[in-house]
Image (spheres, rainbow, N blue to C red):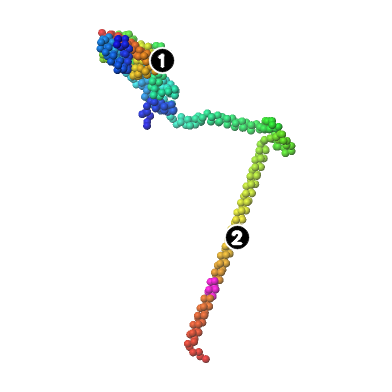
Amino acid sequence: MGLIRLADKDLVQRVVRGDGEAFNLLVARWEKKLFNFAFRLTGDREDAFDVCQDSFVRAYEQIRQLKDASKFPHWLFKIARNYCISHYRSERKLPKLEGPNGGDNELDLESLLFSHSPVRIDNGRHQFEPNELRLIVERALEYLPFEQRETIVLKIYEGLKFSEIAEIAECPVSTVKSRLYLGLTQLKKILTNSQRGVP
Amino acid sequence: MNCEKSRELFADYIGGELSQSDARELKDHLSTCQACRQELSLLSSTKAALKVGWPDESIPQSLTFEFLKPSPQRFSSQLGWFSLPKFAWISLAVSACFIVCLWSLALLRTQIQIENGKFKLSFGQPVQLVSTNTPTQLNSLAPLKVNNEVVQALIAQVLERFEQNQNTKLQQALQEAKAEWEAKRNADFVRIAKEFKYLESTQNVVWKEAVRNSSVLDALARDLYVKTNSSVPVQQ
């Protein structure tokens, strides 16, 4: 039976026994999700890549401490989240704003939000330029406190359950729900304001 | 359900974890509350805008930890000295120290003496053989002197005794082989003599038979001659 068919739990057990190939397979499975998670938290592609790499190295070093092998993904997200917090505290500045193609499209948020951007979120129908909506969403997320941003990323983008997010963020489930509601309300205001900018 | 209670359920609705009973109550409230309905609609649209606005990207460079891949060099190192358990390393270290100590003592021509229960250690002393004239005492041990010449003499004695034993054994083996060979030769002589006597006796029987046959033939010939001459009158 090939390694590729094994579940994460079985791969973790093989890694604990010293199988490096099993760990590389885990990396291949989760690197994209972890990178996007870190990218949405840090707002910088290079930092996200570093966080991703450091997280996997830390995971390999400490994988024997993982008591429940089936929780490897959440444990991995927690490691990455801690790296992102370290990055957030050390940088103390707004990350560079990048377009989808990695360009340095430095734009002022207010001018962007209240410009003639044709963003509409009414009834879930969007009329927007993809690059502009991307910039708006990135900037809007950056304006949120880290805890709310983290909760929105884990819930909206990664689709985790409230209980799983609570475990990663080390807080009660009710706090997670509250952070999601407050964060979405804040984002709604920002996006609605951008819509008002449409003449 | 009032508006405050309704908005507590918004997160569950957005997160897709709203229970059936709460969903029923929320639906009932939304059917009568325009503000909550609009608020929830905007939150749902915001969620959709977030997902559409920032889709997943591919990682710039795929991560592969080369140091985790097995290589022959790594495999051999795992099977080599570094894979020895801790007690094996300790044993090796102790053995090495012991060998170094012995080598140092030999280099310094160390002499170890035990006299009257006291341990004496000296270096570079002249070689002295054990004196046979030293009186032995019950309560003390004779001085034990160890040097290279004594060891060589002992080794020579051992070799000499070994050689003598080997020579003795070789001579015994040769004598046994010689005796065995002589016995076998004598047995062969006896057998040959017996066969010769048998052949000789056989020859005598054949000769006697031949003699008897010739005498019979002579008798027959004489009878035939007599019978032939009797039919013809004898001229007197």
Q: Main secondary structure of the magenta part?
A: helix
Image position, residue B124 (x, y; %): 68, 32
Please name the amino acid that badge 2 sits on: Asn
Give the CA separation, mark 2 to mark 1.
112 Å
The residues colored magenta run B205-211
Image position, residue A129 (x, y; %): 28, 14
Image position, residue A185 (x, y; %): 32, 11
Residue B214 in the image: above or below residue A132: below
Query: Element type at marker 1?
Result: helix
CB atoms at circles 2 and 1 under 8 Å apart? no
Residue on which the image places disc 2: B186
Residue on which the image places disc 1: A85
Residue B209: within the magenta? yes
Residue A159 in the image: above or below residue B161: above
Taking the spot 28% from the left edge, 10% from the top edge, the residue there is B36
Task: Please name whichever residue, B23 or A21, is drawn nearer the observer in this view of the structure.
Answer: B23
On the picture, is B26 further left or further right than B220?
Answer: left
- The N terminus of chain B - image quarter: top left
Q: Which chain carries label 2?
A: B
Image position, residue A163 (x, y; %): 37, 18
